[in-house]
Amino acid sequence: MALEVPDVGYKATLGEAVRRAARLFGDRDFIVMPDRRMTFADAEHRSRELAKTFLGAGLGKGSRIGVFFTYGPEFVVAWLAALRIGALVMPFSTIYKPAELRKVLRIGDVHTLIAPPALLGHDVAEFLEEAIPGLAGQAAPGPYFLTDMPYLRDVWIAGAVDRAWATPVDLSGTSSVTPVSDELVAALEAEVVPADLAQVVYTSGSSALPKGVVHSHSSIVRTTAAFGDLSQAATPDGKPRVLCGFPFFWIGGTLVLGGALHSGLTMLCLERFEAEAALDLVEKERATSVAAWPSLIQSMRSHPTYAGRDLSSCPMLIGGPSDIALVDSPVPGIPGHRGMSETVGNWNGVERKVVDPDVGEALPDMEEGELLIRGYGLMQGYYKREREEVFDADGWFHTGDRVFIYQNRPYFKGRYYEMIKSRGANVSPREVELLLESLPGVAHALVMGFPHPTMEEEVTAVVVPVPGYQLDLKALETQARAELSSFKVPTRWEVIEQESDIPWLGSGKPDKLKLRGILLESMAAAELRR
């Protein structure tokens, strides 16, 4: 029986969500950083003014707008402005290397990219010139016509920039330079509907190409409303203040942002997560909870200054497990599945069942099989993929996750397919393998995920050296870090000296399943010897 689509009490678009938030929570802080803050009323005003600038530049419903900011008011203003005019927003990871950004800009058919002048201490203009072939040679702002980036027409920089190709833009809400009126913005927003596509979140694809998860306004608003309601109900004064350790450009950030717009919760953020700075912010702003991966929570608890802090406002930092997904697990050590990009990082609005992956028959509770999901909280599909490639004839999405279900909650055991799920992000083994095999001295690289207590899975590389070559694993890691986002870089390395020691299939491909078993046995034996 299909899930009933809930009524959130307003039109389920993100434009309506921010207008409603400004009415209900106007003077309440929306985003708080160590050096600046923004209220809900500020967010509505500033995003409306930027929406006018977008419209004046000819952007509108369906326009592909790339957003390249880290945590903070600037991301939120750009994100909301694009959503309010019905554009399809593509947030990009700020830990991308230039080659990775180049890939998603082209795959996403991005028309306009908006970015800051500096990001985490790096010059963004210089980064973009490396990422976008031909950009440095442009003598004026867009429109560009670049063969290697055929849809890209302009790059906007939110601040001072000395490049001729850049279009400067103001995100402060004080200097709109277009003739677009508030009335026109309102009329246009009225034409944005819950079914309109809102956002594409890029994750690693199983074929080494980034995979774009497409969500509508409805799926984001309806599923994140429950997160906001729960946060509000769990706070004595009904005004939750949540330290957000999930990047805004990934689905965890979308989950908290949507919850904030619905409930008025305040998001406490750092441009780069550091345990001491996070503890400072929690203590100063009296955070009531933390939304972050267990490894980040544990790093706060183990910081030398932790014991002397007044963290009484945030019970989850004081006691109990750092990983709440392990609470009440029917099998000790097996975490509840935390959600995925395809479900806006939670399980609201998603039917779920477990099937035998070989025969497709549904399995009872506590029996392990593949997780299938469908419902209003599920993505609309993958960008540039036909529906039939993504969903089966009955509308189910086959996740490839190996789980069991207990009391309607899936518990994560691993993956049937090769994709690695590490710290909330998908990692394509083949993408990492191709990079490692391009490095001097590496004859073969096999990448897989192994269970890890805080990361779900640990990216593990098995490398075989060219005969006669002595591999320097530290050097390999340094080279990998220069080309890949940090979450893709292996944190465990194994060396197999001879190619003949790798188990091979009759097809000539390495037998990763058998190799995994060998390595698991070796790891278990090493643990026993400790």
Image (cartoon, helix red, strand yellow):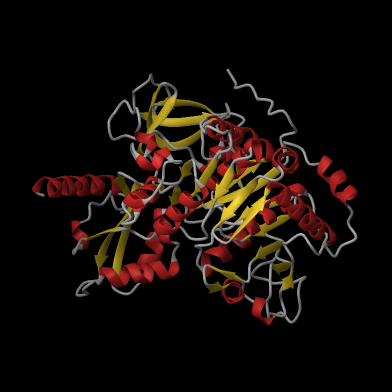
Q: Position of residue 494 (x, y in %)?
A: 23, 59
Q: 458 or 7, which lies in front?
A: 7
Q: Position of residue 226 (x, y in %)?
A: 58, 31
Q: Position of residue 223 (x, y in %)?
A: 60, 34
Identify the residue at image location x=87%, y=62%.
178
Question: As displayed, is residue 469 above or below residue 173?
Answer: below
Identify the residue at image location x=70%, y=51%.
43
In the rendered picture of this protein, how many numbered marks are placed on residues? 0
Question: As displayed, is residue 95 above or below residue 140?
Answer: above
Q: 224 or 379, which lies in front?
A: 224
Name the image quarter holding residue 222: top right
From the viewer's perspective, tell me whether residue 440 is left or right of residue 66: left
Q: 69 or 205, which lies in front?
A: 69
Identify the residue at image location x=34%, y=45%.
454
Q: Residue furthest left?
A: 529
Q: Quadrant of the N terminus?
A: top right
From the viewer's perspective, tell me whether residue 67 is left or right of residue 496: right
From the viewer's perspective, tell me whether residue 484 is left or right of residue 172: left
The answer to whether residue 299 is visible is no
Identify the residue at image location x=18%, y=57%.
501
